[in-house]
Image (tube, rainbow, N blue to C red):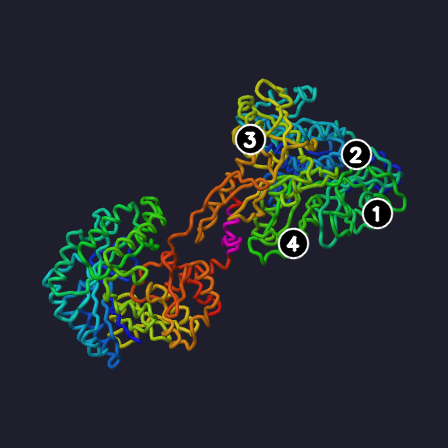
Amino acid sequence: MNTGVYLHIPFCSARCTYCDFNTYVGLEALFAPYVRALLAEIAQYDGFPAQTLFFGGGTPSLLSPEQIGALIEAARSAFQLPPEAEITLECNPGTVNLGYLRALRACGVNRLSFGAQSAIPAELSLLGRDHNWHTVVQAVQNAREAGFEHVNLDLIFGLPHQSLCDWEHTLHAVLRLEPDHLSLYALTLEPGTPLHQQVRRGQLPSPDPDLTADMYEMAEALLGEAGFEHYEISNWCRPGKACQHNLIYWRNEPYVGLGAGAHGFDLRRRYWRVRHPAEYVARVERGQTTEAGDEPISEPLARGETMMLGLRLLQEGVSQDRFRARFGAPIEAFFAAELAEGTRRGLIEVTEQCVRLTPRGRFVSNQVMQWFIPDVAAVA
Amino acid sequence: MSSITVQPDSPSVRDALSRIRNFCIIAHVDHGKSTLADRLLELTGTVSKRDMQEQLLDSMELEREKGVTIKASAVRMIYQAKDGNQYELNLIDTPGHVDFAYEVSRALNACEGALLVVDASQGIEAQTLANLYLALEAGLHIIPVINKIDLPHARPDEVAQEIGNLLGDDPQHMLRISAKEGIGIEAVLERIIQEVPSPKGDSEAPLQALIFDSHYDSYKGVIAYVRIMNGVVGLKTKLRMAATGAITEPVEIGVFTPRMTPTGHLSAGEVGYIATGLKSVRECRVGDTMLDAARPAEPLKGYKPAKPMVFASIFPTHAEDYPLLRDALEKLQLNDASLTFEPENSSALGFGFRVGFLGLFHMEIVQERLEREYNLDVVITAPSVEYEAVLTNGEVIKVDRPADMPDPSRLREMREPWMKIEIFTPAEYIGPIMELVTKRRGISESMEYLDAHRVVLKYAMPLAELIVDFYDRLKSISKGYASLDYQFDSYRPGDLVKLDILINGDPLDSMAMITHRDEAQRRGAVLCKKIKDAIPRQLFEVPIQAAIGGKIIARETKPALRKDVLAKCYGGDVTRKRKLLEKQKEGKKRMKMFGTVEIPQEAFMAMLRLED
């Protein structure tokens, strides 16, 4: 079982119109104290082994290479990260140049994830992204030149006004960049975001779920032809290039969450930290806990979450062996009815090795996953 | 409050009768009946101005809001007339809606006179005329009263002429008042004294008491509102209800002043109440006669039990409220003998009741009372009428719900209730109204001009067409000016079919309906569309069909669900994702399985609530 470390960098230079993540604009003055607080919190985990490190945001690439380098060094030491450990950093393509990327590579970052989102200018502006497609092309080239062998691009589809043709254009443009990994997310209109408001007020059309499903199928076909493995509902990779850190989530393995609003899991409980970076810094400085809440994870809940997360892995699925090793009995022993129903409806496939979604079940996965989640009343 | 009621057998009985006037007020909604009643109560000192709750006679909150009177009541007023004598005036209130025509006719029979109140700017309306005819039939003396003469649009002369044409009265002689401003009220009282005949009746004869209304009181049982036609009733009189056979002894006898004031007895010609101790209004029905069990007379003529005309199913929105709904209906029935109900079970909506109403208005009132007084959240299916099915063996059965419609192989003929309808309208709306009625299978019978501008249109029309928002449409196409009255005419044969709605091949019982064959296709298509919009997508394509027998006449297809995925999960926030799924799962628990189709209760409610 692996353990991951997630560092949350809750800063952005501008807010995207679709984003409801824990991130803040205009807090540049907090960068240095925030990094110091993170360093202090990392130090508390001295001797706690982990295998991956992930800088997520927000926009981690707003930090200087020195700050990132210091964090990596502290993490390597506290978590005893192996030398070849995957260290990912999420980047805004607009905020990085060749020199910056070289410096990142030099301080140990070995995987980059760019929020590319779209190759269509109108879509980028709808999403409130401050970069253009040329910036993305340049960023990927620079990443290669800086020596990165793991480059991921995030895309969003199912946007208001987006046509199948637009999507095809973006996919082709992205494939020309020969990324190692692609994350494709269907737009979810989150309450409170400007995009949600515009749709609710009728200023933008509501995305059509059927068209979005068509886009998903198109991506599956095009990326498949281009040699990508569809290894997770929203993720494709070249062989051997799956994201090790995210696999920890999907296998329902433990991870340490550090930074404002970060979530962590130690197999028995999930916890989350205070959301505002100023509050986070203040608590660390006062020597107080940064945890804002937690939730114990009972065995039935752990089994349900293992299914919910594992079903996201389209090839590996929920491993029979891992499940049995963890819960002392095969999946069938706990979920006979759910497996039968899912099989009957052609939504899941049960093999000797695993339980996984069928191609038909992939884009309606919520319908399947909820069967495995214990009833709220049963847990409470 | 003094009373001039005298002891029975006293020599002054005849004299006492000559000082009694029993009258009612006939008026269209909003023409000022309640306001006039309030002024009469004030002027006679029955109720002080300070105590005057606006529109006192309409005691139910709902009545006040709807501006109509649902239950009749009777108030005794003492009036010192200009002739120097003191009179007892009994104002008997009548329901203002056509659904309660029978109650109206009973209340009219308790009177000798009626005030015909007409709005000086509106003129006579259909309902007023219908009640006026009932009053004339009951032999009442009519006193026309033109109200609201203070309003800028008042045209009292024209309205007086219109009434004159109807009644043959001299328009110059008609009272012109403003109840709101208190103008001309005393003249109304004087006119009542002068023109309404005093009641006739023989206190020596065996008891005959007409029950013209009732309400249920949890302490005193059913309180019957009575007019003593002959004889006397005292606390010792053993009573028998002629039609129902119920026997009881009075718990209390008195008059409304307007509060219930015990007098211990009532004698011929008087109006008052008898608290019967009976446990249900069904034992003490409006129109029945109370007799002295020891000295029974012939019952009065004209009794007929109220018969429901419109049927609908009522289901609680929350299944656990079923017992509360039953209790509430039982309580309503204590006060409402015309309300019928029996348990019903729907595969889609669970347990509920099939309820019979006098009409749509009655149904609306029951629904509102359930919601307001009993705090129940209910859903009501589309109303239906009671059909007659003539079987091949000649037997005739009543069918008020689609599920009970016999198989076509056993069916010789279907018949449906037809109504006589009268529409009063300004002449400019004749065209659209004729179009509306014709579309509803109405058959024109006559058209008469009341004056240069106003017309009475008479039609025969199936009740089934009348109960589907006909009234609202009529109001809307006539800008609110047309008024409507209807009464049962006869059962007539019709090409009626059962329209089934199938979801994924399974019939959805709560949406089935009996309809005319010519209408089936249109209504089927509307229903399919409605259901398609209401149900959530399933993991497979779901056909929604309307069918007659085995034959599909309309179809919609709900496409399969294709997208239901979680968005990107940031920073390892698994809890949030799981909670979204938990919520989704909770929602599914409230769904009903329909074959393999999952339909949330709310979708059923939405289907039923949407208008055609």
Residue linked to disc 1: B239
Q: Is residue B15 magenta?
A: no
The label shown at residue B326 is 4
For residue A51, above or below residue A308? below
Residue linked to disc 2: B19
For residue B249, above or below residue B548? below
Q: Estimate the spatial distance between the alpha carbons at disc 3 and disc 4, rounded to whole Å.
A: 35 Å
Mark 3, other Cα within 10 Å: few <14 / some 14–19 / many ≥20: many
Pointer 4 indicates a residue of which chain?
A: B
Q: Is residue A228 visible?
A: yes
Mark 2 vs mark 1, foreground winner is 1
2 or 1: tag closer to the N-terminus: 2
3 or 1: tag closer to the N-terminus: 1
Q: Is residue B595 magenta?
A: yes
In the displayed structure, does residue B499 sit left or right of residue B89? left
Pointer 2 indicates a residue of which chain?
A: B
Q: Could you tell me which residue is drawn at 29 percent across and 60 percent down?
A: A230
Mark 4 vs mark 2, foreground winner is 4
Q: Estimate the spatial distance between the alpha carbons at disc 2 and disc 3, rounded to whole Å.
A: 45 Å
Picture coordinates of residue B38, whole percent (x, y): 64, 38
Looking at this view, name the residue that lies furthest to the left.
Answer: A99
The label shown at residue B474 is 3
The label shown at residue B132 is none
4 or 2: tag closer to the N-terminus: 2
Say which amino acid is labelled 3.
Leu
Say which amino acid is labelled 4.
Arg
User: Which SS class for mark 2?
Assistant: loop
Q: Which residues are drawn in magenta?
A: B591-606
